DNA sequence: AAACAAAAATGAAATGATTACAACTTGAAA
DNA sequence: TTTCAAGTTGTAATCATTTCATTTTTGTTT
């Protein structure tokens, strides 16, 4: 771990409770773009009392403080990403997995003049089929 | 109306029932990126027996046949767009309105080499504050 | 035109993600 | 150590969406 998760949260103005550290730690180690359910059920193994409400609350706090990204690429479930560096996403319509897409210059996409709109966030979503699923 | 909605649907392989024509007509006349609820409650005025399930079914058919776009820019509600020409979208975090954003070259955004991913759709979403809401 | 079959529409009920809320716990400050 | 605000928990409510059985419509065949 490069930086302690506790410090990571404090630097972003998030009080580091045990539960918040656990969720943040999860997001900084598994870049699978997990759903609330996945985070909750995985963490429950080592923290049996962790409630799903807390996972919801925590993710809300993390997103509000720029410590996580909220993705709406998947119509079924909101997904979260601990990688807050701007990047695009791809969802496979075959297997449902979400991947990062590097090499898309989001800065460039955003810089265009947009008629006085004040843009705070840019999301680029691709849908299609991953290499695995193309074979089938 | 440039082309009859009935013809418009037939050209896209959608059987033009009364309900489908009504929904498609709505999307081709109101580019407000409406929710299912908005479509249903507006159309209900002139078609009191229209069920919300039918609106859901119809929108699914329209999206599957490329006659409408489904937007997930708004976390609360799925929104639909009768403008299927590729374009970016903006949602105002103040008032919640969704606007089209012209001048973003989606072709260019998509053309980049993405490691063998087969991309069938690209969505570009901006979030922020519209001119009106910036004043407040 | 009657009979039929397939497709579409309907409304009620079920599902499932998310939110609201009241009670309980924790941890830092006085 | 008492106090208080913030955080956590579990249950219940909410609300968008889906499922499903029934009814209606439509087009086709006799």
Image (cartoon, coloured by chain):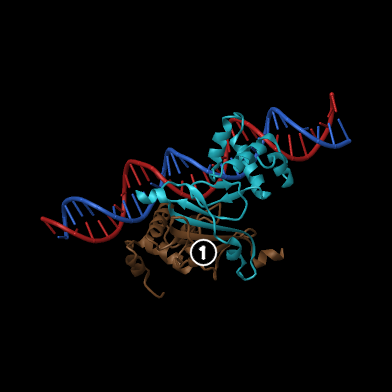
Chain colours: A cyan, B brown, C blue, D red
The chain to which mark 1 is attached is: B
**What residue is rendered at 36% in x and 50% in y?**
A135
Task: Depth check: give the residue in front, A61 or A95.
Answer: A95
Q: Answer whether residue B46 is visible to the viewer in this image.
A: yes
Task: Give the x, y percent position of residue A65.
Answer: 68, 49
Quarter of the image that includes the N terminus of chain A: top right
Q: Answer whether residue B44 is visible to the viewer in this image.
A: no
**What residue is rendered at 73% in x and 46% in y?**
A11
Q: Which residue, given by chain and number where applicable, does mark 1 sit on? A: B109
State the count of labels: 1
Secondary structure at badge 1 equals: helix
Task: Give the x, y percent position of residue A15.
Answer: 73, 41
Q: Is residue A114 above or below residue C28?
A: below
Task: Depth check: give the residue in front, A99 or C14.
Answer: A99
Corner quadrant of residue A19 = top right
Task: Give the x, y percent position of residue B77.
Answer: 53, 53
**What residue is rendered at 66% in x and 67% in y?**
B131
Task: Give the x, y percent position of residue A76.
Answer: 48, 47
Q: Is residue A112 left or right of residue B105?
A: right
Q: Is residue A60 above or below residue B92?
A: above
Q: Is residue A97 left or right of residue A85?
A: left
Q: Is residue B60 above or below residue D12?
A: below
Task: Depth check: give the residue in front, C7 or A37.
Answer: A37
Q: Is residue B42 left or right of residue A56?
A: left
Mark 1, other Cα within 10 Å: few <14 / some 14–19 / many ≥20: many
Corner quadrant of residue A115 = bottom right
């Amino acid at each position: 771990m490069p930086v302690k998760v506790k410090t990571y949260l404090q630097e972003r103005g998030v009080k580091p409770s045990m539960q918040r550290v656990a969720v943040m730690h999860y997001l900084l180690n598994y870049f699978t773009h997990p759903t609330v359910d996945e985070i909750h059920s995985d963490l429950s193994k080592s923290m049996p009392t962790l409630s799903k409400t807390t996972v919801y609350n925590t993710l809300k706090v993390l997103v509000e403080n720029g410590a996580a990204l909220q993705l709406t690429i998947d119509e079924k479930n909101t997904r979260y990403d601990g990688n807050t560096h701007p990047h695009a996403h791809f969802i496979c319509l075959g297997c449902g997995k979400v991947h990062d897409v590097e090499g898309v210059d989001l800065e460039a996409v955003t810089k265009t003049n947009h008629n006085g709109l004040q843009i705070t966030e840019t999301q680029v979503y691709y849908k299609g089929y991953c290499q695995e699923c193309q074979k089938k």
